[in-house]
Amino acid sequence: MRVVLCAAALLSALVPATAQQSRRATIWDLKLGEPIAAQPSPDEFRGFACGSNGGAPRQPLTGWRDFARCRAEPDGLHEVYFEYDDELEFIARARDADREITRWAGTTEVAFPVVVSALFDAAGVLRGIRMVTDARPDHRNDITEANLRKRADAYMLGGIMAARFDIVTARDCTSSPPAEGESTVGALFIKQSCEMNDTANARKVILRVSFYRKPGQSGTNPQLPTQLTEGQFESSARLEIRRLN
């Protein structure tokens, strides 16, 4: 019995260390309503830069404290773009561990490439976080390619985030009809906007989901109708969580 108890104690002591080794900081570790001092250390992330409203990075930064170098958005908040640490990905590649490569590849959320950023007010308090599906092409030439979701699937992240934050379509969302020149992708046309005040957690959740063809985009070559086009569609999901008051 004493041997079993000792083994159990040893196992319980090892589990936290193992779990810590196989985890990296993400956007969910940021603390809304808290100052920079309360945020995860910049050493836990990389690639800091001024954000571009969920797009590609602009001016490089050294960490959260450089937020004021980024031009404020119309609401007065400064967007700081950042990327997830890539150490675990490099370890997985060194071990040729396919599943782990996918798990730790790039800045991703449930295998969707994303652009993440933090929104600070003038006093350096985190007022919001932003996550947008990453539409940038991936030019990496890795021997083992990570099994990540493609841009055509990007809109699907919207449903996952809606479930995560208990967004109810009938209650919290509105769908817009096609504007002039917009059309379906196959049988689908999605242009949805959702907002929910989560008063219990003092936050507002904003979700935008798009999947359609913009004016001028087509599934076939207008000059050769038998030839299919590639990439001519809008597929995206955009999540923002703002601190209430």
Image: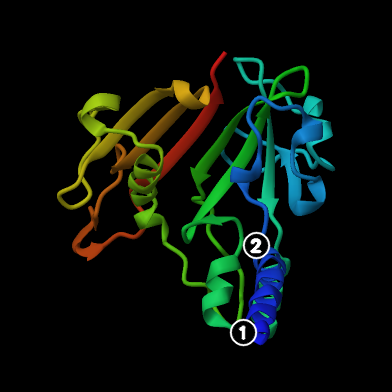
Q: Quadrant of residue 174?
A: top left
Q: Image check: 70 left or right of 183?
A: right
In this view, the residue farthest toward the left is 187
Residue at the (33%, 40%) spot, across then down: 210
Amino acid type at circle 2 is Arg
Residue at the (43%, 29%) spot, across then down: 206
Q: Nearer the viewer, mark 2 or mark 1?
A: 1
Q: Image check: 110 left or right of 80?
A: left
Residue 33 % position (x, y): 66, 24
Image quarter in which the C terminus is found: top right
| Mark 1: few/some/many CA within 10 Å (<14, 14-19, 20+) | few
Front one among 201 and 99: 201
Residue 240 % position (x, y): 50, 32
Of the two numbered discs 2 and 1 on the same chain, state the one appearing first in sequence. Answer: 1
One can see residue 16 in this view: yes
Q: Are marks 2 and 1 in contact (CB under 8 Å)?
A: no
Mark 1: which secondary structure?
Answer: loop
Tell me how far mark 2 sits from mark 1, CA to CA.
34 Å
Tag on residue 1? 1
Mark 2: which secondary structure?
Answer: loop
Residue at the (34%, 43%) spot, across then down: 163
Tag on residue 23? 2
Residue at the (60%, 66%) spot, across then down: 104
In this view, the residue farthest toward the front is 1
Image quarter in which the N terminus is found: bottom right
Amino acid type at circle 1 is Met
Front one among 142 and 128: 128
Marks counted in the figure total 2
